């Protein structure tokens, strides 16, 4: 038989454990789900912010090209047959700086059908620099300060090249389409080290439909990489760009990987483990050609839980169909994204566990206190049964203390104590009656034994002998008494 002192506290503690534990588990799961939803919202906010910044970064060359092409169309009288003529360069530069407000990462090129190319650039020097080339003079590229152009002097730099803009793919595509085009990623000969760029180009025609010039502007992949690196993301997080075939365009961590055999490296073959793992997961889940717009998801790499936000760049109607099929991926580790929330949830979980242990301990103590009067009643009854109960018995004293309780246990203890006292009184009375009965029984038994002895012949003979002896002694004493009387005067 299992004791109530074990079963009752165990059941009571189990009920508290289930109630508090279930509540705590539900709260923990709910808070973790809220934290994960919050993490996704924060990630989407960060991803949208980066996307907006990249939109402005990528749309600036497109807007610059369109604005300047429109300005050239608005001046059909402006001769573009000799792009390198100093007065023309001044006029064109005024249009660039006042209308387009070029930034450090912007450039603008104008190429004509004679093979001349005029480029305004601030990338290398941070100043207004003009780069000029003329294929009729060998195609070498000279870098000159715009403010000194046409005044003679030595150029800042000379790049030995046979550059002919008419042979570039963007030039031919713009004339073939007759409108704005965006080239695939290529390695520009106008940049040091043939850096990878994307060129936006738009042709300008005269009234007879003959091409006057092709206006173009470059999107520097290195500039995108530097922008991403300036985001100051946590060390375990990264943002990177890739396009449909899965080639890596730029990343926010480390130096941008150089081209391999004239091609960009695959994101799945990146030296960065996060880029490699994320790109592999995206490729397996969606395929690089089908990454959805504005998708957020979570994946696990080893023991690291990562949140990923992916989105297409330049997907609005204005730039639709330009062929700039780039994807953005922002990867942030869960601990960096919602570390404070997770820490708070874990602290609350430990606190809940401590409260649960305390509740179980208090519940067990309460349950023990609830069954102690019942156990006391059982001990008193057992002692009463064995006739081991007296006024000094410990359980009687505890029962007397229980009568002072102002509840049902006190009433039960009071009734039980009164019953015990009545039983003890009846027991004492019974003992006294039994003792008197034993005394009466002993006296009656003695009288019976005496009568039994007196009725025997042996006792009758002894009695007769005793009577005879007394009579003989009496007769013998009578003459002596008479003689003593006679001699006494």
Image: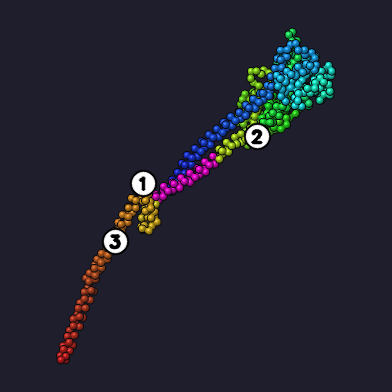
* Residue named by callout 1: 408
Callout 1–callout 3 Cβ contact below 8 Å? no
Q: Is residue 350 magenta?
A: yes
Q: Is residue 477 magenta?
A: no
Give the SS element for disc 1: helix
- Tag 2: Cα neighbours inside 10 Å, few (<14), some, or many (≥20)? few
The residue closer to the viewer here, 288 or 31, is 31
- 438 relative to 96 in the view: left or right: left
* Residue named by callout 3: 432
Pinpoint residue 54: horizontal percent, then vertical percent: 67, 25
Name the chief secondary structure element in magenta: helix
Q: Nearer the viewer, mark 1 or mark 3?
A: 1
The residue closer to the viewer here, 58 or 198, is 58
Q: Is any part of residue 110 visible from this angle?
A: no
- The relative height of residue 187 versus residue 438 in the rendered view (above or below) is above
- The relative height of residue 22 versus residue 429 in the rendered view (above or below) is above
Callout 2–callout 3 Cβ contact below 8 Å? no
Give the SS element for disc 3: helix
Pinpoint residue 64: horizontal percent, then vertical percent: 70, 19
Q: Which residues are magenta?
A: 348-375
Pinpoint residue 457: horizontal percent, then vertical percent: 22, 73
The residue closer to the viewer here, 238 or 95, is 95
Q: Is any part of residue 457 visible from this angle?
A: yes
- The relative height of residue 433 versus residue 218 in the rendered view (above or below) is below
Pinpoint residue 121: horizontal percent, then vertical percent: 75, 23
- The relative height of residue 361 versus residue 233 in the rendered view (above or below) is below
Give me the C-alpha separation between circle 1 and circle 3.
36 Å
- Tag 3: Cα neighbours inside 10 Å, few (<14), some, or many (≥20)? few
Residue 316: quarter of image: top right
Residue at image position (71%, 24%) is 103
Quadrant, the C terminus: bottom left
* Residue named by callout 2: 234
């Amino acid at each position: 038989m299992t004791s109530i002192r074990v079963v009752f506290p165990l059941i009571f503690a189990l009920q508290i454990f289930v109630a508090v534990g279930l509540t705590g588990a539900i709260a923990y799961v709910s808070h973790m789900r809220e934290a994960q939803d919050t993490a996704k919202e924060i990630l989407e906010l960060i991803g949208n912010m980066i996307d907006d910044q990249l939109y402005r970064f990528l749309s600036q060359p497109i807007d610059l090209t369109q604005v300047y092409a429109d300005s050239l169309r608005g001046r059909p009288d402006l001769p573009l047959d000799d792009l390198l003529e100093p007065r023309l360069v001044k006029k064109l530069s005024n249009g660039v700086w006042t209308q387009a407000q070029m930034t450090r990462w912007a450039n603008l090129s104008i190429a004509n059908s004679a093979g001349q190319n005029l480029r305004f650039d601030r990338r290398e020097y941070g100043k207004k620099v003009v780069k000029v080339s003329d294929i009729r003079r060998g195609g070498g590229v000279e870098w000159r300060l715009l403010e000194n152009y046409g005044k003679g002097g030595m150029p800042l730099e000379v790049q030995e090249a046979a550059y002919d803009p008419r042979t570039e793919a963007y030039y031919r595509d713009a004339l073939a389409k007759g409108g704005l085009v965006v080239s695939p990623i290529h390695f520009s000969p106008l940049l040091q080290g043939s850096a990878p760029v994307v060129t936006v180009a738009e042709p300008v025609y005269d009234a007879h439909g003959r091409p006057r010039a092709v206006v173009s502007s470059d999107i520097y992949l290195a500039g995108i990489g530097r922008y991403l690196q300036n985001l100051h993301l946590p060390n375990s997080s990264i943002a990177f760009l890739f396009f449909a075939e899965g080639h890596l365009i730029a990343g926010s961590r480390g130096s941008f990987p150089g081209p391999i055999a004239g091609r960009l490296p695959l994101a799945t073959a990146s030296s960065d483990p996060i880029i490699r793992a994320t790109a592999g997961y995206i490729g397996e889940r969606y395929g690089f050609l089908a990454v959805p717009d504005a998708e957020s998801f979570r994946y696990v790499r080893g023991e690291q839980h990562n949140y990923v936000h992916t989105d297409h760049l330049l997907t609005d109607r204005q730039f639709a169909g330009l062929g700039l099929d780039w994807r953005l991926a922002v990867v942030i580790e869960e601990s960096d994204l919602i570390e404070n929330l997770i820490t708070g949830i874990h602290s609350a979980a430990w606190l809940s566990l401590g409260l649960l242990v305390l509740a179980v301990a208090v519940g067990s103590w309460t349950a023990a206190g609830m069954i102690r009067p019942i156990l006391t009643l059982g001990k008193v009854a057992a002692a009463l049964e064995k006739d081991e109960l007296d006024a000094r018995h410990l359980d009687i004293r505890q029962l007397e203390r229980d009568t002072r309780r102002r509840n049902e246990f006190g009433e039960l203890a009071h009734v039980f104590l009164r019953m015990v006292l009545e039983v003890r009184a009846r027991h004492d009375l019974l003992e006294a009656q039994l003792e008197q009965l034993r005394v009466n029984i002993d006296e009656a038994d003695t009288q019976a034994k005496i009568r039994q002895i007196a009725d025997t012949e042996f006792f009758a003979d002894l009695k007769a002998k005793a009577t005879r002896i007394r009579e003989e002694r009496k007769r013998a004493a009578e003459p002596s008494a008479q003689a003593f009387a006679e001699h006494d005067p």
